[in-house]
């Protein structure tokens, strides 16, 4: 039973993943197991030799189709929780932006008795200025709608207890980082620099990044709906008070000709719209609360599992 398992999704990046395995070998030695999840690659498919030639052992999981970055990680988490339940798991991307040299720092922090998850909090980023601006906007919107701060991504180390709980959460199939916040596990942050890609361009375009942010909020759908309902109710109450004030001004003769009908019409329109939105939010909140989440069977997505044995020292 391995003590450390590296879970990494790979999509059309075979050469990059091979370099990641070599860098992990240099940092952690041979006492580590790689669980590479090939997310339905068709052009640049990772082979078991990429792991074996680095002097490491592990598992290559080929998926039947492309399911996306987050679900590929969820497959890896579910596989490790089912087959290697006592291992310490490290989740990281395969493109080099999650630096293998930072893994010992995560594991060192995880060694504490009161820690279930250690997440990497970026202290130095390599993205463009425009990306950082949109990222800060995303964090602000997330805080405003969910009431929680999200300051980390997928690079994390999980103790066996954290691994098993996270793998059992259906929300992890939607967004991994948000699921960590929802899990109520004992989370510790470790400030780590972000690296640069080994090669090639990121597969994430602007639309995919926006969708990724929306999925982060979907994990807290109930909290978001409640907050929207409260805001709408406050606006509706304000509209009622303004309508009452408008009627009083009209009654005592302070309203100019035409002003009363325009003001009253606008306020009634705002009241009806916010009232309808409040009712819809309450109904959706009830649906979310009463709905029973389903756990996707990760085995249905797997095409084959290739076990890679450790070769002689290289």
Image (tube, grey):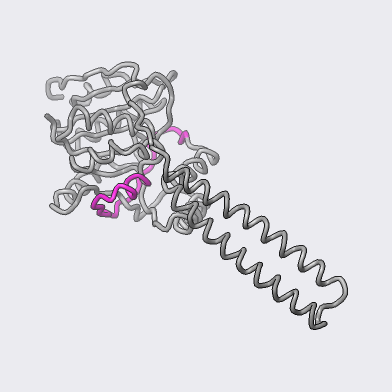
The residue at the point 49 percent across, 57 percent down is 227
Name which quarter of the figure residue 53 lies in. top left
Q: Taking 204 as reference, is 125 left or right?
A: left
| Residue 292 x/y as whole percent | 39, 37
The count of marks equals 0
Tell me if residue 286 comes above or below residue 235 in the rendering.
above
Residue 57's spot in the image, x, y percent?
18, 24
Observer-nearest residue: 100 or 161? 161
Of the 4 image quadrants, the one containing the C terminus is top left
Q: Does the magenta stretch include residue 279?
A: no
Left or right for 234, reference 201: right
> Residue 136 placed where, x, y %?
47, 56
- Residue at the image point whose x is 16% and y is 35% from the top: 87
The residue range painted magenta reads 178-203
Question: In what quadrant of the picture does the N terminus appear?
Answer: top left
Magenta stretch: residue 200 in it? yes
Res 262 → quadrant: bottom right
| 276 and 15: which is toward the camera | 276
Above or below: residue 47 compared with residue 255 = above
Q: Which of 66 and 103 is in front in this view?
A: 66
Which residue extends farthest right? 257
Which residue is depicted at the point 29% across and 30% down? 76
Residue 243 drawn at (x, y percent): 71, 70
Q: Which residue is outermost to the front? A: 251
- In terms of image quadrants, where is residue 278? bottom right
């Amino acid at each position: 039973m391995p003590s450390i398992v590296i879970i990494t999704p790979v999509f059309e990046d075979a050469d990059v993943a091979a370099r990641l395995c070599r860098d992990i070998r240099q940092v952690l030695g041979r006492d580590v197991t790689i669980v590479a999840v090939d997310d339905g690659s068709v052009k640049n498919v990772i082979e078991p030799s990429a792991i074996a030639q680095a002097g490491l052992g592990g598992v290559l999981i080929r998926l039947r189709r492309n399911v996306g970055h987050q679900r590929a990680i969820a497959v890896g988490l579910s596989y490790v929780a089912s087959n290697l339940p006592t291992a310490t798991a490290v989740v990281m991307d395969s493109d080099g932006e999650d630096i293998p040299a930072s893994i010992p720092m995560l594991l060192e922090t995880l060694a504490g008795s009161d820690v279930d998850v250690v997440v990497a909090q970026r202290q130095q980023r390599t993205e463009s200025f425009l990306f950082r601006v949109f990222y800060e906007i995303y964090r602000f919107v997330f805080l405003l709608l969910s009431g929680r701060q999200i300051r980390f991504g997928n690079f994390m180390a999980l103790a066996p207890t954290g691994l098993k709980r996270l793998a059992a959460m259906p929300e992890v199939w939607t967004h991994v980082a948000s699921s960590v916040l929802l899990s109520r596990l004992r989370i510790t942050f470790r400030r780590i620099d972000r690296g640069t890609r080994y090669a090639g361009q990121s597969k994430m375009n602007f639309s995919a990044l926006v969708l990724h942010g929306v999925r982060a909020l979907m994990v807290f759908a109930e909290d978001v709906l409640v907050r929207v309902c409260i805001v709408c109710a406050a606006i509706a109450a304000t509209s009622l008070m303004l309508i009452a004030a408008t009627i009083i001004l009209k009654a005592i003769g302070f309203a100019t000709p035409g002003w009363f009908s325009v003001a009253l019409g606008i306020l009634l329109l705002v009241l009806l719209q916010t009232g309808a939105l409040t009712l819809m939010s309450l109904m959706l909140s009830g649906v979310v609360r009463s709905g029973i989440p389903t756990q996707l069977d990760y085995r249905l997505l797997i095409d084959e599992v290739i076990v890679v044995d450790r070769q002689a020292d290289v």
